[in-house]
Amino acid sequence: MPGRIRGQLLKGTTTLLVLTVLREGELYGYEIAQRIRDMSGGAFVPSEGSLYPALHALEADGALEASWREGDRGPRRRYYRITRTGLGMLEAHAQEWAAFSLGMTRAVGRVDR
Amino acid sequence: MIGLIAFIGGFGAFLIAAVALVRRSERRLGTGLPTASPPARLGTEGQAEISAYLDRMTTELRLPAADVAEVRAELADHLYDSIASLEAEGFDPESAVREALGRLGPPAELGRLLRAAHQSTRRLLAGAGGGVFAAGGGFVLGYLGGVVLALLGFLALLAVGSVLALVGVRLLDIAPQDGGNTINSLLYVAAFAMAVATATRYAVRTSAGLSRRAPRTVAVFWAVAGAIVFGWLALFGMRGPQSWPSVALELCIPLVAVASAFFRIDRPMPHVGRWAVIVTALTVVVISLGFFAVTGSSTSVSEESAPVLCSVSDQSSSCQPDFGFDTVAPMAPAAWLPEGTFSGGGWGSDPASGGTRVNDTMGSQGLPSWTDLQYEAWHALPVDELGPGGVDTHYSTPFAVQPAALNGNSLSAVFHFERLRDAVHWWIFLTGVGPDGHRYRMGDGRGGQSNFNGSAWDWLTAPQ
């Protein structure tokens, strides 16, 4: 199991992670944190203190829509849903990340040699 | 006609849109969701710890009430989930609470981050624009409401006057004898004050909802802006009949704006339905059209064009026997003003300056032996059923003097009674220094009535 990603490195990726997990369907805050942890095999554990500001900022930007309703298996929750704007934002962030990741991989690989 | 319909339609649509925007924005200012009750298994201490954390966090939020309630409820839900999960991992309840709170981080920091997330620049701009739009709608709506209330008040006054007339009391005897100037100006300013109050309140509530800020936070901005803009309008922009009571009320307009921005600003605005807007607008239109039809399209109260026609030589029963003209100066001896010295003259509005122009046309012989010709305006007694009032003999000097300008064979001068506070009833005389070195009047003069017309600033700076 890969080690946990350092906080500083994770900073700035919360938006991409949140949009990615919400692409699959509606989730509430706690579920989003769990889903990110599960999807990354425990590598990414977003700070809960930064998760909610990120969710609310995305909502303010129109990338997410939120609504209160009873959950399928439990009490009332605030569910987030990705919007068309959010999908566009996800695509842009994903491309940026791919470029960044490729560049980093090449650079780090060169250092290793 | 099509233009009028388009104007009324557009105006109505603007008002309805403004009211709809206010109502939509106000949804954020409601009480919002209640926070879910904590699970009983947490115990009193754990619950108190969570409550204290959420309280500290919400003090940093400074968001509208509905947003605060939502954030608080969402984070409480998160904490309860987190604690349950930690307990399942083997934490005891007390440690689970502390761990869950620790994972959320310092409450003040979380509150600040959430506030920054909500109060984006986009929302700030939306709040500012929406506030201005709502203020415009609120101003018009408040003014229309104020006009309707003023008209209803006026009708009530007429009704009271009619009832009093039945028992022999004349309302006009108690009302100021200024041709309704004071009442007009007070009704005008009262409607304006209502417009200012509604506009400021609409602006605060709308911008708070759209920018996601607490109403009291944005109230500071709108109070200052309202006091400056509406204060400037009240002091310099509102031109019309003025009186001391109306000027005093106009000087209070900035206070009205400030008070409206803060007083019970957390409470919702009274519900204004679309039909109320439509009915109010139509009422104003119908009453205005009726008013124009009755008054012949004239709403000016600044000056009455009819001069007092009765001359001093007319000693009929409808005239007072003594007009007090000798208070001004003795009449020039007939030998010095032979028949034909003056062939005409009168007074009327001066289109160029808006003042009152008085003129006399001289015969061909002119006034060669006279010097220092001038027009003198004297206070006069009001016109009543006994006939036109004469010179008010309480005064020993004219309240305004203008040199008579000679142009060809015509003498003239312009008076600005509309800029003088106490020039309601007046007589104007042409006087001059005769061959013996004494001043004489050259006729019976002419009288009339004017009302002050200008801004509050004009009133305050008007010469005494």
Image (tube, helix red, strand yellow):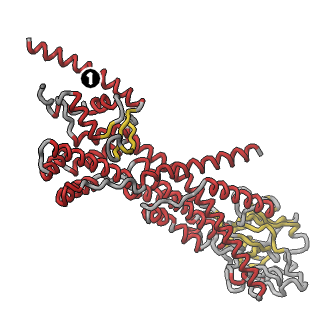
Relative side of B377 to B322, left or right: left
- Find residue B313 and report its image quarter: bottom right
As helix, strand or loop, the secondary structure at mark 1 comes to: helix
Q: Residues within 10 Å of mark 1 (few under 14, many from 20)?
A: some
State the residue in front, B364 or B167.
B167
Question: On the picture, is B274 further left or further right than B163?
Answer: left
Q: Nearer the viewer, residue A102 or B317?
A: A102
Q: Residue at x 39, y 54 (%)?
A: B32
Number of marks:
1
Q: Quadrant of residue B143?
A: bottom right
Q: Position of residue B45 (x, y in %)?
A: 17, 59
Does residue B216 lie above or below B18 as drawn? below
Is A89 located above or below residue B263 in the figure? above
Residue positioned 42% across, 29% down in the render: A84
Q: Residue furthest front?
A: A73
Q: Where is mark 1, residue-wise?
A: A97
| Residue B90 appears in the figure | yes
Find residue B196 and report its horizontal and vertical position in percent.
53, 60
Q: Which quarter shows the C terminus of chain B?
A: bottom right
Residue A15 coordinates in the image, percent (x, y)? 29, 32
Specify the farthest residue to the top: A113
